[in-house]
Structure formats: structure tokens, C-alpha cells
Amino acid sequence: MPSNLEPSYEYQVGGSLRISAPSYINRQTDDELYQALRAGEFCYVFNSRQMGKSSLRVQVKHRLERDGVRCSSVDMTSIGSDSITPEQWYRSLIAAVWRGFDFGKPNDLKTWWQTQEAVPSVQSLQSFLEELVLKQLPDGPIAIFIDEIDSLLSLPFGMDDFFAFLRFCHNHRAEDLQYNRLTFALFGVATPSDLIQHHNRTPFNIGHPVELCGFTLAEAAPLAEGLLGYAKDPTVLLQAILNWTGGQPFLTQKLCQVLVKRCSGEIQGDCQLILPGQESQFVEQLVRSHVIEYWEQQDEPEHLRTVRDRLLYDEQNTGRLLGLYQRLLEGETILSDDSREQTELLLSGLLVRREGMLQIKCPIYQAVFNLDWVQQKLTDLRPYAAMLNVWAKHPEDASRLLRGQALSEAQAWSQDKRLSNLDYQFLAASEALDRQVTQQALEVARTQEITARLAQQEKNNRQQRRLIIALMSSLLIALGLGISSFILYRRSIYSEKVANLSTVDALTKSAQALYDSEQRLNGLVEAIR
């Protein structure tokens, strides 16, 4: 392929495509949204970023205007800011709708605003629609497009009143036929449940949801025109591109553009004609070298980093999102539901619903946000990642579970976060093991305490036995001494009696002798003694 070949077909990567852009692809969604708005239905197109919502809005608005429908379009990012007040916001919205309908000079709007000084902002919006839009526009349908609706969710004040007013406009059709002329189309990265968040208010449950899907080969067929001359059959080349992008509009346009630049010599590479049968191999090499490898540096205009940031922006929920995504990467089949985790992954663009199942949208995403990437992010996120990764492969290995202070720190860290099922299983198993080990330690401590008490009791018993024996011995000794003392006492008393009797006997005999010897006085004295 000559290096000086000038491409005659222009691909646009990022941004809204102009009405006449040859690379704009009409999808089934275009006709669905057009027909619904033409019938006066409230519609909303909620999907991930860079799926072509803004371009769809431009194209459908143009088609409606050709049919005589009066349209006004508002990009919410142009009027919202962190410091804006509710009154300023409603004034900016009304001014943007005014300009879209081309009502006249701004001074006319300022004059009308003077009549709304003491009126609440939502009522001013209602008055604007009734007094200026519905009355001043000729009879016929009116459509107001509101793009980037998700930017309202980050305003410093609640937007429940605004979305409740949109629901009022829909429901008021039964009472005021003029409201049948008015319809709204909302575009953004959101869900209906995001719009009215106060649980005491009726949810945003009106409107026709329009699902925005990726390109099919039949829909994307016009893109093959820009591939003419680079392969014998550009449709085969386009199919190879769609196989990698899953029909994702941004990636599809980007790969087509990269291929053209590569083959036209604008970027380094082989400029030879892509031979039949080599289309898939050529596109794969192109994807890996210009998209997947060093993707963070090559991601211009930004797309993959947008997906990444959507996954990681809320640290409290990141673990649960990545855990669910990891299960898909590992081949698990997951049924689609309305859980917050699945909704967030769908809004990130990473996943799609197909036949009631969750699936990764395209091989490019799967190659960029692969298992290694997920593991690394989870490792950065979790303080216990290394232990969990080993335990996940060998759940029977209890040595990898957390215990004590490590478990307490992990539980404190997980307190305000929504983690994956694997995280909760790991923490639950760790908690069960910690309880078991603590219980065993308590049992051991109790056993040791009982053993110590028994040993002390036995020691006390031995001491008591020794004391009793000592007391008994002392008693026996004391008894023996007492008996001996008593015997000696009795003996001493007896001896004394005997001695006394002998003395008395001697005195008696002496007195008798003196009396017989005629010494009667002396004998009487002796006898008295």
C-alpha cells in the first residue's frame, strides 16, 4: 500500500458527531428513540460513557425538527458547578431552554424573570413552560433534550424537586391537554433510581427506556467504506475489528482510524495490502500494539482510563465491584439482576447483559482489565490481600486466615466498605477460626486453672493432714504428760500422807511415853502438838 495514500473517509474518535458525519452509524436505537418521542413519550437513554448518546441526541433532534417538532437541547455540564445555588441553576436551565427555542432577545427573559422574584425556583420553571413555551410556540409537539443528566447528581443541593417536576409534567397530561404537546428526553450515565433519592418521595418511574447497544456488523457496514483499499474484502476487516471491540462505538471508530493511519503511513508500521485470511491476525497485532500495550499512555482520547476511574472512584464499593468482575474473568456464570454492584459495572461500560447473563463487553476490556490487573488493584485496596490470595487457592489451609490484631484491623477496615463475596468468606472464616482458637485457649486456661486449684487443694489437704497428725501427737503427748503428772501428784500426796501419819504416830507415842513417865504436863503438850 503506498505510503502517500490519503484516506477519503473520516473516522471521528470521541465527541458528538455532526449531523452529516459519514461515520455516524444509525442503530435500531435511533429509530426507537425517534418513534417514541414522535409519539410524545418521555424517554431516557442511560448507558455508559462514549456509547454515542450525545451523537444520538443530535441526530434524533435533527430528524424531529425536520418533521416540525420544536426542539431545545441542554447540556447539563454547561450550567452546573460546585458553587452554584438552586436559584442560579434553575435560571441557567431556563435560559438554556430559551436559547434553544430561539425565543428572542435575552432582555425579554430578564423582564419575565422580574415577575418571578418571590416565586420558588421549581414553580418558575413550571411558569416558564406554561407561559412562554406552551403558549408562545405554535401548536405542535415540543421536545426538550437534557444531556449529561448524571452531572446533576454531584450538585451541592438535591435535585429531587427537579425530577419530581418532570414526573409532574408527565402525569399532568391527564388534566391539561397542553402538556401532551411537551415531552422530554434524558441522556446520561445513571439509572432511574438515581434521579429521586429521597425514600419518602415517589421514585422516577415514568418514561420509555431506550437501550443503547454496540454496533452490529450490519449497522456498522458504512464504516467499511473507509477501509477500502487496505484489504480485498473490507467487511472481513471490519468484522475482525468488531470482534475485538464488541461493537463499542468509541473503540470501533478508534481502531478503524488507527488501521487507516497505519496503512497510510501516518504511524509506523507495515503498509502492505492485508492479504485474505490475515485480517484477524493483522487487527490483533494492531490492537495489542496500539491499544492494549502501555494502554494508560496510549489512551488518547481518553477512554480506558474513564472505565478504570469509574471502577475505582468509590473506595467503599470498589472491592465488591472488582470481586464480582473477577468472578466473570475466572469463568463463573452470573445471572443478571438489579443489584447496585451489577448496575455500577454496567454503567462503567465494562459489562453488558446478554440473554439474562452478565458478560464482559469486549475482548479489549478483558485484555486490559485482566486478572492480574484486578489482583493488583485488590492488593492495593486490601490490607490482607496476600493472605487472601493464598487462602482462595487452598481454603483448607487455615494458617492463611487472620487472627488476633490482624483480624481486628481487617474488620475495622472493612466496616464501611462493600466487599466481594470472597472477602466476606475469608473474613468469616478468619473470625470463626479466631473464635475457635480463643475458645480453645479459654478451655486450656480453664483446665490449667482447675488443675492448679486441684493441686492447691491437694497441697492444702496434705498440710491439713500433717496438722491433724501433729495435733493428735501433741494431744497424745499432752495426755501422756497429764496422766504422768497426775500419777506423780497422787504419789506425792500419798507420800506426804504417809509422812504425816508417821509424824503423828511418833508424836503420839512420844506423848504417851511422857505421860506414862509421870511427865503428864509435857506429855499433854506433846499430844497437842
Image (cartoon, grey):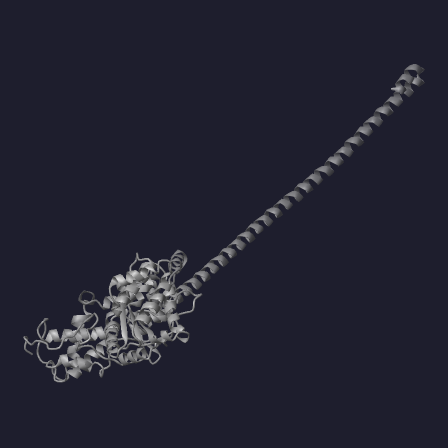
Name which quarter of the figure residue 5 lies in: bottom left
Q: Nearer the viewer, residue 262 or 36?
A: 36
Kindly indicate the quadrant of the structure image that contains residue 177: bottom left
Residue at x 86%, y 23% (from the top left corner)? 506
Q: Is residue 525 visible?
A: yes
Coordinates of residue 286 in the picture (x, y in percent): 16, 74
Q: Which picture quadrant has residue 405?
A: bottom left
Q: x and y percent of residue 423 in the render?
A: 37, 65
| Residue 393 visible in the shown view | no
Q: Position of residue 72 (x, y in %)?
A: 27, 70
Above or below, 482 relative to 309: above
Screen quadrant of the C terminus: top right
Residue at 89% x, 19% y: name it.
528
Residue depicted at x 73% and y 35%: 485
Q: Quadrant of the N terminus?
A: bottom left
Residue 134 appears left or right of 459: left
- x, y (%) of residue 78? 26, 63
